[in-house]
Amino acid sequence: MRTKILFLISSLFLLLPTALFAQNNQEQNEEIFKARVVEIVEQKNVTRDDGSVSIQQKLKLKGLEGKWEDKEIIFDGTEFDVLSASEYKIDDKVLVNYSVGPEGEENFYVIGFSRTSPIYWLAFLFALIVIAIGRLKGFRALIVLLLTFLIILKFIIPKILTGSDPLLITIIGSLFILILSVYITEGLKRTSTIAIFSILISLIITGLLSVWFSAITKLTGFASEEAMYLIGLSGGNINIKGLLLAGIIIGALGVLDDVIISQVALVKELKISNPELTKSQIYNQAMRVGISHLSSMVNTLFLAYAGASLPLLILFSAKQPPFLTFNQVIDNEMMATEIVRTFTGSIGLVLAVPIATFLAVQFIKKVKN
């Protein structure tokens, strides 16, 4: 066991420098660097026509990294009005974009706050709590989380950007995530293999449903501004509709993992606690618990999608043209996309319970393995 854990940790340390190197290269090419506010040179409040107040600031900054370290920079934000501009204070850390104008002049623009430090502290607190409560299994879960992030960042996203089919690439990546997550957290045993096959079958059903209903509802994937930006960024190489379907698959994967592993573990415990039960009795008892679990998980899936789309829901609830009636709202592609995403994911989740329960009842032995 210790040898396996050491191998996993070593693999992670080999992968991490690659991810960090790629990130540093991107920042260097974009000329974005971190700086600290050392002085508020000028500040004025401008009232817009709609009554809102715009805070405009001229700041003196000091670079904190790279070739900009310890260099003083002036950012004049009083010359223009930006709707999302923040109010900065002395010692705030900010991100600055550097560019060269057509006549060779240097331009500096404050993008926003630098949030890396509090995010790193939050990640550290999360890892600490997971390990403190979950111990070895919690540590394994963190490894799986990191590997999942790396698979998405280093395999799925680069392949999609080069023009590969997003749905196919996501299915392949999800299969790797699935195998790693189950075997690392649950161990190499029969119940883990049953859980993997149950999740895979449920994912295939979810994928087929999403393809079918996306075609029926004629979803194009172009409803969001992000899709239009990606088309311009990639020169038209990205399959936007495939990207939509890929998002549905990834969204359903995590929920299916939770439901199915719990259901398989339940069947195993029922067989151990009472070996005299028939397969039919075990299935019925496990399904009663699974249905109770399922009720909360379907709501969880809906709330997850609703939370991500809350601004969109508020916009449609305002009852402004062209969203005056319920039918007008669901006819809009943005809303129809979220509806298809929610229902196809929920159907796959509902079917996962009887699938996992049936496979577990059939293939888990009545002796402790």
Image (cartoon, rainbow, N blue to C red):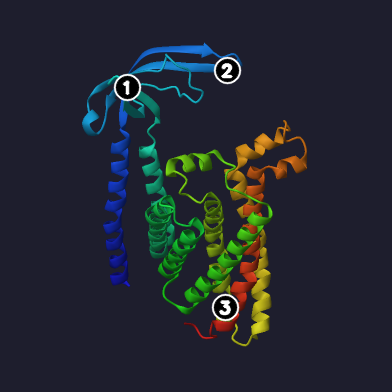
Q: Earlier in the sequence, mark 3 or mark 1?
A: 1
Residue at mark 2 to residue at mark 1: CA–CA distance: 34 Å
How far apart are labels 3 and 2 at the CA level?
A: 60 Å
CA gap, disc 3 and disc 1: 67 Å
Q: Nearer the viewer, residue 105 or 307?
A: 105
Disc ID at residue 52? 2
For the image, the number of numbered tags is 3
The reply, left or right, for residue 205 in relation to residue 5 is right
**Three-letter code for the amino acid on which mark 2 is drawn:** Ser
Instruction: Report the disc number at residue 360.
Output: 3
Q: Is residue 114 above or below residue 287?
A: above
Please tell me which residue lies in front, 316 or 133. 316
Q: Is residue 280 left or right of residue 67?
A: right
Q: Secondary structure at mark 1?
A: loop
Whole-percent x, y for residue 233 in the image: 43, 41
Residue 235 drawn at (x, y percent): 44, 43
> Can you say whether 311 is above or below 57 in the image?
below
Query: Which residue lies under the disc numbered 1?
Result: 102
- The residue at the point 61 percent across, 73 percent down is 355
Label 3: which secondary element: helix
Q: Earlier in the sequence, mark 2 or mark 1?
A: 2
Mark 3 and mark 2 residues within 8 Å of each other at the beta carbon: no
Name the foreground residue: 39 vs 172: 172
At label 1, which amino acid type do we have?
A: Pro
Q: Is residue 270 visible?
A: no
Could you tell me the amino acid type at mark 3? Ala
Please state which of residues 126 and 109 is positioned toward the viewer in this rendering.
109
